[in-house]
Amino acid sequence: AALRAPARSSSTSLLRGKRAAAAMARWRDAFALLAALPAIVASIGGFPVTWDHSCAAKSVLNWPCELSYVQKRVMVIGANTEAGRDVAITLHRGCARVLLVSRNASELAEAAEIVRNERPSVGVCPPRIHPVVSTATGDIRNKTFAWELTNVALKELGGPVSFSWNFENI
């Protein structure tokens, strides 16, 4: 006797047809929404300012937005100066990995403590990511110290610095 496939009932075929129709309707609705998106955005006055590439709407005009610092490795030379400390605080609040450098060890320790006491801005750091503050004391004009800074950045910040600021006027 030959094996025969069981006959499909009409209810099974009907069910598959309904599922396919429902899936097609969902896709049609999604495409309709995407097609209407420009009109919807225009009707509410544009995209939210948090999606903008500019920082002007975030009340930050002189520095890039704090969100642009997340996990950046930055070296601040002259971090013991007022301007250097302010930049380090801004970077730290933006969840950056900061290497503070100065020729004066005691002033650098004070500046590092002030920076570490600042809390990152709410919502800037991704989950389980914390800003890092490292210090190094020495004269950047010394070639050996400059090489040591490279090693400090690799070990403590996790890689080479992305950019640096010099506030010691050297």
Image (spheres, helix red, strand yellow):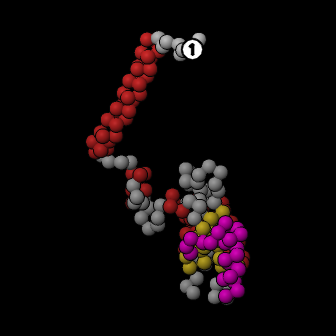
Q: Is residue 38 magenta?
A: no
Residue found at the far front of this picture: 1
For the stretch drawn in magenta, what is the main secondary structure? helix
Point 29% across, 39% down: residue: 36
Query: In which quadrant of the rendered image does the N terminus lie?
Result: top right
Above or below for 77 versus 25? below
> Which image quarter: residue 168?
bottom right
Relative to 107, residue 30 above or below: above
Vertical order, 86 against 35 (above or below):
below
Residue 52 horizontal/vertical position (percent): 39, 55
Looking at the picture, how far across and down is residue 159, in whole percent?
Answer: 64, 69
- Can you identify the residue that label 1 sits on? 2
| Quadrant in the rendering for residue 161 | bottom right
| Circle count | 1
Q: 81 or 93, which is in the foreground?
A: 93
Q: Is residue 158 magenta?
A: yes
Q: Is residue 163 above or below residue 40?
A: below
SS of the residue at dot 1?
Answer: loop
Q: Position of residue 124 (x, y in %)?
A: 55, 54
Q: Residues within 10 Å of mark 1 (few under 14, many from 20)?
A: few
Q: Which residues are magenta?
A: 143-164
Is residue 107 visible in the rendered image? The answer is no
**Residue at the spot 55% in from the left edge and 76% down from the top edge:** 165
In the foreground, 13 or 102? 13
Which of the 4 quarters of the picture holds residue 55?
bottom left
Q: Amino acid at mark 1?
A: Ala
x, y (%) of residue 84?
57, 74
One can see residue 36 in this view: yes
Which image quadrant: the C terminus? Answer: bottom right
In the shown orientation, is residue 150 left or right of residue 34? right
